[in-house]
Image (spheres, rainbow, N blue to C red):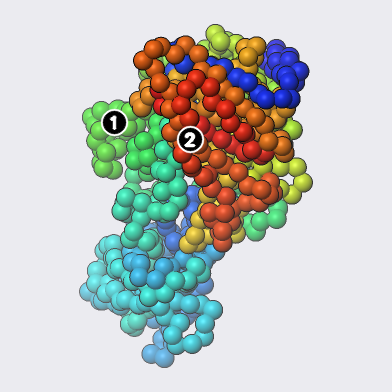
Amino acid sequence: MKRLFLSLLSLSAAAALSAQTLEMKMNVSRLGAEIQPTMYGIFIEDINFAADGGLYAELVKNRSFEFPGNRLQGWSVGGRVELKDDGPFERNPHYLRLCYPGHPQKHTAIENNGFFGIGLKDGAQYRFSVWARVPQAGQSARLGIELIDRASMAETQVYTAAEITVDSGDWKKYEVILTSGVTDPKATLRIFLNSPVAVDVEHISLFPVDTWMGHQNGLRKDLAQALYDLQPGLFRFPGGCIVEGTDLETRYSWKNSVGPVENRPLNENRWQHSFKHRYYPDYYQSYGLGFYEYFLLSEEIGAEPLPVISCGLACQFQNETMDAHQPVDQLDCYIQDALDLIEFANGSVDTRWGGLRAEMGHPEPFGLKYLGVGNEQWGPEYPERLEPFVKAIRKAYPEIQIIGSSGPNSEGEQFDYLWSEMERLDADLVDEHFYRPESWFLSQGARYDNYDRKGPKVFAGEYACHGAGKKWNHFEASLLEAAFMTTLERNADIVHMSSYAPLFAHVEGWQWRPDMIWFDNLRSFRSCSWYVQKLYMQYCGTNVLKLTDMEGANVTGADGIFASSVYDEDNGCIYIKVINVSDRPREVKVNFEGLRKKDILTGVEAVSFHCDDPDAENTLDEPYKIVPQTTSLDFEGKTLETTAAPKTFMVYVIRK
Ligand code: AHR
């Protein structure tokens, strides 16, 4: 309550400001709070087919025949096929025996349609691999591997083909590179038994050779590039509700996500059942993009990893009774999971989990500094579970910063209760979530201005403007996010982290929108919200520079203007962000004070993010419809006079 009350007070004060030229001031010599490198980050959760079927570049669905209920889901089979369950990978025991159908003119073949089809690009190479053996040692069998156009009945339906000879009675990995001569977003993988000898096949995989950084078991390049291009300071993973699971059994179990990929057991995705309009059961986690891949990607994009682990509460939205959760006095293995994860990331190679990291290819520690315990939890059941985690982590790893949760509400009794509990438990940061409509974002320009400076720091961990009516990733939502972000920036002394959510969505597989980056099997586009995040990350600065109206009040939305400013010690530039959410132009004046004799201010550039149609959005067909425009900023002196165009996010870059 305290937090909300103070915000409302400062809003009504701001509303009294003049509607004329907005005159502001800043003292360029008085540097404010340091902006944490983690200030603007990203958060990936496997919702909307973000990981399996998305960023994780595997093109085969149900590659290990482990989808429960239907082990052959995603596959079509013809001829004689037997499903077996004594395969070489203990935690994924199922495999297929392709048998000779008994007549040379009959065929045995299987086909996989991938995730909404298999995306192929003309000229691109694809690495097909399979674990196989001939059940009768001493024999040898041939497997035909084809990428085909399933829709076509013509003979030209085979885009590319290769053959593998399976010549051992022991399980072995066989690999072949296929080059596609066409572009097809919806191709099919077909595997033929080409000789009258049975073959056992397991873990059938197809990846583009050209993955992000060329890694095998790698990530889709365009999607990883969209993350790299943001240059985020923080990377939260793996959830979200996925951390909690629909029930405890299906919570994200990080230990299942490391080690050889063939032996990572399948998990039912928490988002499998949540949306009735989506076909299910069809959404499982292969854990192919697991914790090793996550830490590596964090390193490669230059972001601090922030893993989140289960605190013993299954998703509270899905479970109303307490017996769904792990009892408080039986949390030991959950706490051990947390400690072991830190060891996996940072431990020496002589430790059990540090040793596994080294075995997987990264002997150097990943330098983990943060750990979230629980996702979006609420009620007394959360702090009572968090408490033993805090004690154990502080004891074993006092250097790790712990992130607690303020639940799913952006304000109110529950929110205040959880904040006070996080203070009591001495959490380092509190993760706030707010998926809210336009009106909420408009009212939050001063959200953090009066927060308690002594308590835990803020992590605005999941947020997005959800448009009223049927509007999703439209320009105006992103403009309001930009406006809201001025309060993050201005209050960088207590806001140390933030991330928009969700990150990714497959156009044919989404459950939740809006999302930051959309894709189909071959293409992707960056939403307007991506560009807003990008502008904040690019013009992040190192220190807050206090920017107020001439009476000293923060500029938090009165007459539609939001503003904040930072200084970048690395290049001597001042970045002023002005967001005009109204539909009329506003004259804006910034008076620079505190200049010493040798100080000269010169304009560098003005970046404008605007679209005449507030409902417009970027799309797969028009990915660059709405992008920031940069022009040079003609300015020198002590007063910047400019016009903030209607519905525009401006960044002014001035060199001191
Ligand atoms: O981002 C989608 C979901 O929203 C997250 O999984 C959860 O934390 C929140 O409710």
Q: Is residue 27 above or below residue 240?
A: above
Q: Is mark 1 within 8 Å of ligand 1?
A: no
Q: Residue at coordinates 75% horizontally, 42% vertically from top-left?
A: 468
Q: Please, what is the three-letter code of the amino acid marked with disc 1?
A: Pro
SS state under label 1? loop
- Left or right: where 363 falls relative to 39: left
Q: Is residue 314 something that shows in the picture?
A: no
Of labels 1 and 2, the one closer to you: 2
Q: Position of residue 86 (x, y in %)?
A: 39, 59
Question: How many residues crowd mark 2 within 10 Å: few (<14), some (14–19), many (20+)?
Answer: some
Q: Residue at x 49, y 68 (%)?
A: 185
Q: In the image shown, does 326 or 488 lie closer to the viewer?
A: 488
Of 305 and 229, nearer the camera is 229
Q: Nearer the viewer, residue 510 or 518?
A: 518
Q: Position of residue 250 (x, y in %)?
A: 55, 42
Give the vertical position of 94 relative to 23 (above or below): below
Q: Secondary structure at mark 2?
A: loop
Q: Report the disc number at residue 365.
A: 1
Callout 2 amino acid: Leu
User: Residue 115 vs residue 163: left or right?
Assistant: right
Up/down of 505 relative to 255, above or below: below
Residue 444 location, x and y as percent?
68, 25
**In the displayed structure image, the side of residue 276 where residue 482 appears, left or right:** left
Locate the C terminus by quadrant. Answer: top left
State yes or no: Cβ of the residue under disc 2 lies below 8 Å from any atom of ligand 1.
no
Where residue 651 appears, as percent x and y from the top left, is 52, 33
Left or right of 157? Residue 327 is: right
Circles 1, 2 touching at the beta carbon (< 8 Å): no
Query: How many marks can you see?
Result: 2
- Work out which quarter of the rendered image holds the N terminus and state it: top right
